[in-house]
Image (cartoon, grey):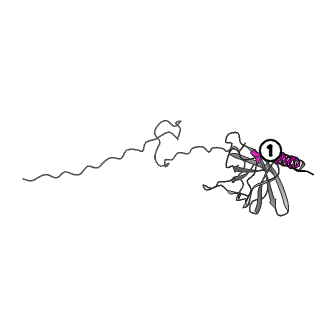
């Protein structure tokens, strides 16, 4: 091969390499909204004032007896995810949704797990299955649903002692304000003055 042929082959190889690199970078740019930072995975903990990553607000039960996990997310651009809880060798998957009221709030629902045990919780991206955060937590308690719970309000009982007679008619309600009977005030005795 002569020198001109080597130059043409070199240019073609260079062009093919540039096209390959650009196409690889272009595919990664499409995934940028769901891109996950490399390095250590953020720890999933209970929320406190120092949290910078996702954190657990509370655990609860819905009206059907399914477990709810309430989360606080670090930003609006946090990727869509699902929750996986490992209890020993058994894994439970929970579908997660953001709240429409506060976009940094999300909840996950799924099978009820008993409180008290240390569980391995993982937030996993729905695109690509990347691990977003993980932690080992114990469910401290479960908040029960209050929907449909009716409590009977007891009647208000009078706060006055029964020894004090009530004024008014016998049909007046005992919860009305009844002033205490007035007590006579004592005056000091006066002594005659001497010149």
**63 up-or-down from 135: above or below:** above
Q: Residue at x 50, y 39 (%)?
A: 176
* Residue range (magenta): 6-35
Near-viewer residue (92 or 51): 51
Q: Position of residue 10 (x, y in %)?
A: 86, 50
Q: Residue at x 71, y 50 (%)?
A: 70
Total numbered circles: 1
> What residue lies at 70% left-to-right and 39% top-to-bottom?
100
Q: Could you tell me which secondary element the residue under label 1 belongs to?
A: helix
Q: Main secondary structure of the magenta part?
A: helix
Asked if residue 86 is positioned above or below residue 175 in the image, the reply reads below
- 108 left or right of 166 in image: right
**Residue 131 sits in which quadrant?**
bottom right
Q: Which residue is mark 1?
A: 26
Horizontal arrangement in the rendering, residue 182 relative to residue 104 (left or right)? left
Is 81 contained in the magenta span? no
Which one is in front, 68 or 3? 3
Asked if residue 181 shows in the view, the reply is yes
Instruction: Check the image and name the residue furthest to the front.
Output: 2
* Residue sitting at x 88%, y 50%: 3
At which x and y percent is residue 61? 75, 50
Horizontal and vertical percent position of residue 52: 65, 54
Q: Is residue 62 visible?
A: no
The one nearer the camera, 169 or 95, is 95
Please identify the residue farthest to the left as the structure is shown.
Answer: 195
Categorize mark 1 by other alpha carbons within 10 Å: few (<14), some (14-19), many (20+): few
- Where's residue 58, x and y in %? 69, 53
């Amino acid at each position: 091969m002569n020198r001109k042929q080597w130059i043409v082959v070199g240019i073609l190889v260079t062009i093919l390499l540039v096209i390959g690199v650009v196409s690889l970078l272009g595919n990664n740019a499409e995934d940028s909204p769901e891109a996950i930072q490399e390095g250590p995975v953020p720890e999933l903990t209970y929320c406190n004032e120092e949290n910078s990553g996702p954190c657990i607000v509370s655990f609860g039960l819905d009206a059907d007896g399914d477990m709810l996990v309430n989360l606080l997310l670090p930003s609006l651009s946090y990727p869509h995810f699902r929750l996986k809880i490992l209890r020993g060798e058994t894994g439970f998957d929970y579908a997660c949704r953001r709240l429409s009221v506060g976009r940094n709030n999300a909840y996950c629902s799924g099978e009820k797990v008993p409180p008290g045990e240390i569980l391995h919780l993982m937030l996993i991206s729905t695109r690509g299955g990347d691990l977003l955060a993980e932690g080992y937590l114990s469910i401290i308690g479960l908040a029960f649903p209050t929907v449909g719970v009716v409590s009977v309000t007891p009647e208000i009982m009078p706060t006055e002692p029964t020894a004090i007679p009530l004024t008014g008619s016998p049909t007046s309600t005992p919860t009305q304000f009844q002033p205490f009977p007035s007590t006579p005030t004592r005056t000091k005795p006066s002594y005659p003055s001497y010149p």
